[in-house]
Image (cartoon, rainbow, N blue to C red):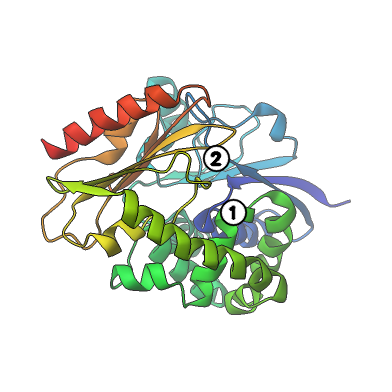
């Protein structure tokens, strides 16, 4: 009888999807090839993100590209977010692990690349057929695009898949695609699939409209772009649009709202001419959020929109200082 495995990953995220696929290859190499893997996407929640204990139902449980959990059920763990391990209790628990199956390195631009490197260096598990997936996960999550235009025009198949994943990245959509990627199916084949392309077409039209909306609403002062998308009819946007519209900017702060949360998104311009001087993850952590030194977010309850707007103005003042 096959061993039951749960891989919890950052949902609605290209790097989360890619991380789950690469980890699946590692698990089949190290644990057993006879595994039944269930994929469970996780989203950040108002007041702080966590891994629900109820999701960890496997004989082997793994968490990738998401916050650490001190659950006794946790087997494997990989993350690269500065806010991935928070507080003394989590740090002590992580440090006490002797399994050799838990890895945390905020120096990495993507969790997928962290898993790929550890798989090769620690476990002798090379995955050349997943190299393109790993490469694109690192480009996307670490914003290693040559310029903002490439990130906004969305011509590359991987960027089209990224756009679809960010909207339709629940388990029903992603689980079979993660499984296919883990088994060596080409990233381009997944991205050019008729279903993915049929979902991308209207999203691209919406993306173009959002470019116009942000252009109309955004304001740049003292190197910080700010815009509020509440009431625009959409709470999702390509995070590189502000830097394409305002190449002279250093940072961007945006407020959005949906039925599930009010949100502040904070980022730094990867192509800025002036060196970044603020750690965005640390700033977001002050409000219960987190992320990376270069990009982060804070989630509030749906009825806390005004609180989110106030916090956004405070963050803008910090970034301008």
69 over 246 or under it: above or below: above
Q: Identify which residue, 150 or 308, lies in the foreground.
A: 308
Position of 266 with respect to 14 (left or right) is left
Write the residue at 52% across / 36% down: 44
Q: Position of residue 104 (x, y in %)?
A: 42, 44
Position of 166 with respect to 141 (left or right) is right
Q: Position of residue 297 (x, y in %)?
A: 39, 38
Write the residue at 64% across / 79% down: 189
* Front tag of 1 and 2: 1
Write the residue at 75% across / 35% down: 57
Residue furthest to the right: 1
Report if the CB atoms under discs 1 and 2 are less than 8 Å apart. no
Position of 3 with respect to 12 (left or right) is right
The C terminus: image quadrant = top left
Q: Earlier in the sequence, mark 1 or mark 2?
A: 2
Q: Identify which residue, 61 or 123, lies in the foreground.
A: 61
Question: Where on the picture, by quarter, is residue 278?
Answer: top left
Q: Identify which residue, 162 or 131, lies in the foreground.
A: 162
- Residue at the spot of label 1: 167
Question: Where on the picture, by quarter, is residue 152?
Answer: bottom left
- Residue at the spot of label 2: 99
Q: Secondary structure at mark 1?
A: helix
Sort mark 1 into few (<14), some (14-19) or many (20+) by Cα contacts within 10 Å.
some
**Residue 305 appears in the figure:** yes
Position of 106 with respect to 195 (left or right) is left
Q: Could you give the CA–CA distance between mark 1 and mark 2, rounded to whole angstroms?
A: 36 Å
Q: Secondary structure at mark 2?
A: loop
288 over 81 or under it: above or below: above
15 over 144 or under it: above or below: above
């Amino acid at each position: 009888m096959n061993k039951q495995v749960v891989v919890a990953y950052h949902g609605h995220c290209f790097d989360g999807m890619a991380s789950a696929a690469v980890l699946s290859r590692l698990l089949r190499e190290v644990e057993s090839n006879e595994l039944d893997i269930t994929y469970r996407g996780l989203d950040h929640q108002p007041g702080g993100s966590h891994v629900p204990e109820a999701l960890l139902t496997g004989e082997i449980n793994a968490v990738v590209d998401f916050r650490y959990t001190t659950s006794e059920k946790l087997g494997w763990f990989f993350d690269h977010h500065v806010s991935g391990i928070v507080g003394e209790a989590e740090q002590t628990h992580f440090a006490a692990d002797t399994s050799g199956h838990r890895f945390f390195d905020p120096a990495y631009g993507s969790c997928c690349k962290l898993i790929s490197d550890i798989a090769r260096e620690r476990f002798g598990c090379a995955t050349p057929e997943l190299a393109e997936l790993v490469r694109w996960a690192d480009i996307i999550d670490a914003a290693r695009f040559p310029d903002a235009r490439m990130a906004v025009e969305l011509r590359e198949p991987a960027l089209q898949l990224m756009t679809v994943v960010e909207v339709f990245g629940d388990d029903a959509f992603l689980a079979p695609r993660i499984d296919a990627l883990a088994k060596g199916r080409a990233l381009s084949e997944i991205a050019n699939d008729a279903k993915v392309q049929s979902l991308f077409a209207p999203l691209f039209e919406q993306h173009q409209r959002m470019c116009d909306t942000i252009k109309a609403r955004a304001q740049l002062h003292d190197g910080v772009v700010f815009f509020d998308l509440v009431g625009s009819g959409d709470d999702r946007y390509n995070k590189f649009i502000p830097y394409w519209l305002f190449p002279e900017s250093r940072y961007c702060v945006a407020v959005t709202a949906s039925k599930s949360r009010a949100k502040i998104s904070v980022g730094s311009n990867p192509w800025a001419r002036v060196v970044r001087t603020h750690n965005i993850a640390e700033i977001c952590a002050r409000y219960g959020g987190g992320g990376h030194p270069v990009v982060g977010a804070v989630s509030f309850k749906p009825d806390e929109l005004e609180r989110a707007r106030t916090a956004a103005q405070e963050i803008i003042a910090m970034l301008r200082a």
